[in-house]
Image (cartoon, rainbow, N blue to C red):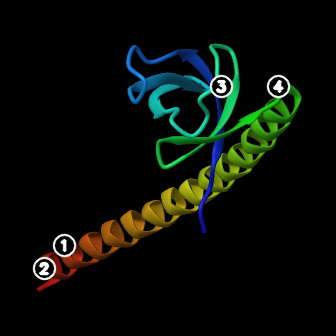
Amino acid sequence: MCLAIPGCILELPAEPLGQAKVRFGEVVRPVCLACVPDARVGDYVIVHAGFAISLLDVAEAERTLALLDDAALLDDAALLDEAALLDEAALLDEAALLDEAAQATKERGEA
């Protein structure tokens, strides 16, 4: 499955086939505008694999970006839950290792 993401054009390329600067949230990436020759600074474009494939109106771009942000928050929450479970498992493993070491030390002392 492929995903195209909306980005806002910050700067047009100096050359016709050059790379524009496009902002995706806090990230700025170079994007080819060859497929959207009418694009201007401030326009939103749909970008796939480094190519702007269409223009997008501001309302639709903001709605799509909000949905992507919501999805990222859900992913972050899931990652935090997973990290907490891994930390708990690591603590249990560490406690088991300490118990084994204590038991081995005790057995050596009794032998």
Identity, as a three-letter code, of the amino acid under mark 3:
Asp
Q: Quadrant of residue 61?
A: top right
Looking at the image, residue 73 lies above or below residue 30: below
The amino acid at mark 2 is Arg
Determine contact: label 2, label 4, CB under 8 Å.
no
Amino acid under label 1? Thr
Q: What residue would you read off at disc 3?
A: 38
Q: CA distance from mark 2 to mark 1?
A: 5 Å
Circle nearer the N terminus (3, 4) = 3
Left or right side of 46 for 108: left
Where residue 93 appears, as percent x and y from the top left, is 40, 69
Q: Name the residue tied to disc 1.
A: 105
Secondary structure of the residue carrying tag 3 is loop
Numbered label attached to residue 58: 4
Circles 2 and 1 in contact, beta carbons < 8 Å:
yes
Using the image as rendered, state which of residue 29 and residue 34 is in the foreground.
34
Q: What residue appears at the point 50 percent right and 62 percent down from the top-left corner?
A: 86
Q: Which residue is mark 2?
A: 108
Q: Earlier in the sequence, mark 2 or mark 4?
A: 4
Instruction: Locate residue 109, reporting x and y percent.
Output: 14, 75
* Mark 1 Cα shell of 10 Å, populated few (<14), some (14-19), many (≥20): few
Disc 2 from disc 3: Cα separation = 81 Å
Q: Earlier in the sequence, mark 4 or mark 1?
A: 4
